[in-house]
Amino acid sequence: MFIQTETTPNPNTLKFLPGQDVLGLGTAEFTDASKAASSPLATLLFGIDGVSGVFLGGDFITVSKAESSDWGTIKTLVLAGIMDHYASGKPVMIQTAAETEDTDEDPLVIKIKDLIETRVRPSVAQDGGDITFVRFDEGVVYLHMKGSCAGCPSSTATLKHGIENMLKFYVPEVTSVESAY
């Protein structure tokens, strides 16, 4: 198995591409080991000293390290862990992590969600992250940043200058975009 790695805009995260499906559809984020029980892969990766977060995408794994840790040490262990997991035949997830669908019929919300889904999420996934819609309230769009986007030094610029400007252009009712934690 050959696993490619890519840097992300966040210096504390690396994107690992195992060359096969990770989740296929959807994403799953684990911000600490106690939340990783539903994923044998994430549990294994949290067993590596210095790993502080795991984000699973369609065909990639984004791993975050503690600020005090060094990629020189952790990267090799993560690569070995991913190879060991796939060699074991265990599933990536024990149960499917499905995001709930909002059945809100508000045409503005539908348009905002569609723009995020088609124009924002694909480009953010290239950097090893994800952004999901949380709510639209009085002109403000609240988004949740995951994976390499969470804590990235350029995430504020991405939200304010990239996503906010795009949404304001297509949906004039949008006045601003904020991060929802």
Image: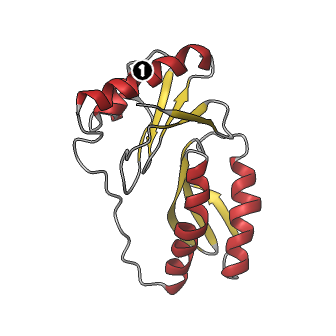
Residue that label 1 marks: 80
Q: Amino acid at mark 1?
A: Ala
Looking at the picture, how far across and down is residue 124, in whole percent? Answer: 60, 54
Q: Position of residue 36 (x, y in %)?
A: 33, 34
Q: Where in the figure is residue 156, as x and y percent of width and height?
A: 72, 50
Q: Residue at x 70, y 82 (%)?
A: 172
Q: Is residue 104 visible?
A: yes
Q: Quarter-wise, where is residue 7 in the image?
A: top right
Q: How is the image coloured?
A: secondary structure
Image location (x, y in percent) of residue 147: 53, 43
User: Which of the pair 87/178 is nearer the observer?
Assistant: 87
Residue 167 shown left or right of residue 102 in the figure: right
8 to the left or right of 4: right
Q: Which element is circle 1 on? A: helix
Q: Nearer the viewer, residue 156 or 82?
A: 82
Please determine whether, in this image, residue 80 is positioned above or below residue 42. above
Name above or below for residue 8 compared with residue 170: above
Q: Residues within 10 Å of mark 1 (few under 14, many from 20)?
A: few
Q: How many marks?
A: 1
Let me know if residue 145 appears in the view.
no
Front-lying residue, 23 or 19: 19
For the N terminus, the quadrant is: top left
Q: Residue at x 44, y 42 (%)?
A: 19
* Residue at the image point whose x is 53% and y is 52% from the top: 130
Q: Nearer the viewer, residue 32 or 39?
A: 39
